Image: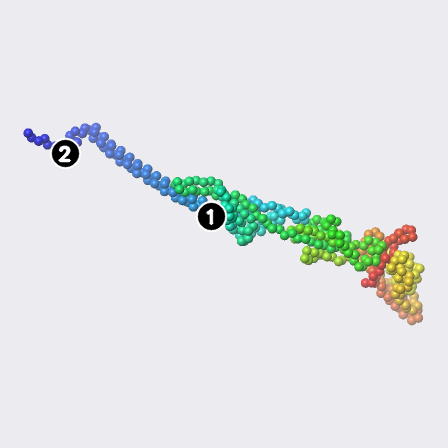
Amino acid sequence: MSKKKKLPWREYRKAVETPFLRVMRHISFWLFLLLYLALLYFLYRVGVWFYHYCEESFILYEGGQIDLALEKSLRELNEADALTLRSLLDSEAPQVTSFDDGESLLMEQYVTLSEKELTAKERHGVTTDGHSYTLLADGAPVGEFRIVSVGQELRLGLLQVDEWAYDGGSVEFSYEPHDYTFVVPEGFQILVNGIALDESYRTGEEELPKVFSVVDAYHHMPRLQEYRIEGIIRTPQIQILDNLGNPVEAELSDGAIRLDCLWSESEPDDAHRELAISMAQLWANYTLRDAEWDQLRVILIPNSTLWTQVNDSRWDRRYIDAHTLIGYENVAVTEFVSYGEDCFSCRVTMDRTVKVDKTQQLVTDNFDMRFYFVRLPVSGEPNWFIADMQGV
């Protein structure tokens, strides 16, 4: 019995394979190849995505560090102007007097703060949702601010990415109040930042100038009065107006101004000028024995110091030879100051010329005195009197 010979696989497949199977075999090969390539492309895309996801995760993780959030917050604070700083850092306006503007003072502090380098130092006691920092301006602590977490995301199952945001802050500004003292004549007006000081700012301290020591017994003369204001923060604009409403130069020294001046002068009217000249000439005539006591006494206050001196003949009267009055020249009334309707002072200057009867020589006497006149109701209707005289 002969042994059946086995056909090789390829020959056997050709012997039994139908045309249909042959077509299907070719289709299966290309389909498998296509699926294989598609799988490779899918794995490639997944790899690329995963790579970028990992890269993005690490970038987000690194960017979510609190140090970078702090750096960003400080950069925003340092680049901000005064108005922006005020919106980022709260602060209360100072309690001020009526002479200061609290809002203006506060904005000045923000302007100053915007010109400084702002840094931070982490404070102890970090909260669960954020970090608290001490704000430093040029190295000096001025306030605090916070950075809080506003979101969290877990990446790759390991990395917790935090999103930080500035959560506001506050600053405390220091204000140094100052006190000011003013000593000015009564009737002067003190303006501090445009606000006039009223009687409530007077301390009660006052001083009568020595030049008024005699006349003050018959008419109230202006004292030097003291005013005081306290708690002013900004150096004030100070203006002092005299009794006529004119500005007076005044220098502030160690928080004080003292004006030892008297009331300001003005131009006398004709009535006051004629009154001063007539009384001054009568007095000049008396000193040169051209007028007697009975003529002079009517212009002196009865029983006053001046009246008593003249009546007791203790006033210095000059003695010259018999003479004839020639007249008065260069008569002037200057330095006129009105202290109200019933008192004024002025300086009277004039040259009085006489001729000596024996030698026929002309002698000129220069007269220069300051008079204080008051109007008093003596023996009936008010009359004008000489209350005091002072040599110039």
Q: Amino acid at mark 1?
A: Asp
Which comes before the other along the chain, label 2 or label 1? 2
Where residue 130 appears, as percent x and y from the top left, is 49, 44
- Can residue 330 be seen? no
At 81% from the left edge and 63% from the top edge, which residue is drawn?
Answer: 392
Within 10 Å of disc 1 (Cα), the crowding (few <14, some 14-19, many 20+) is few
Q: Describe residue 346's horizontal placement relative to residue 293 as left or right.
A: left
Q: Nearer the viewer, residue 63 or 21?
A: 63
Where residue 119 appears, as percent x and y from the top left, is 52, 51
- Can residue 296 be seen? yes
Q: Residue furthest bottom?
A: 359
Q: Is residue 55 above or below residue 256?
A: above
The disc placed on residue 67 is: 1
Within 10 Å of disc 2 (Cα), the crowding (few <14, some 14-19, many 20+) is few
Mark 2 → mark 1, Cα distance in angstroms: 77 Å
Q: Which image quarter: residue 47? A: top left
The secondary structure type at the circle numbered 1 is helix
Q: What residue is pinned by disc 2? A: 8
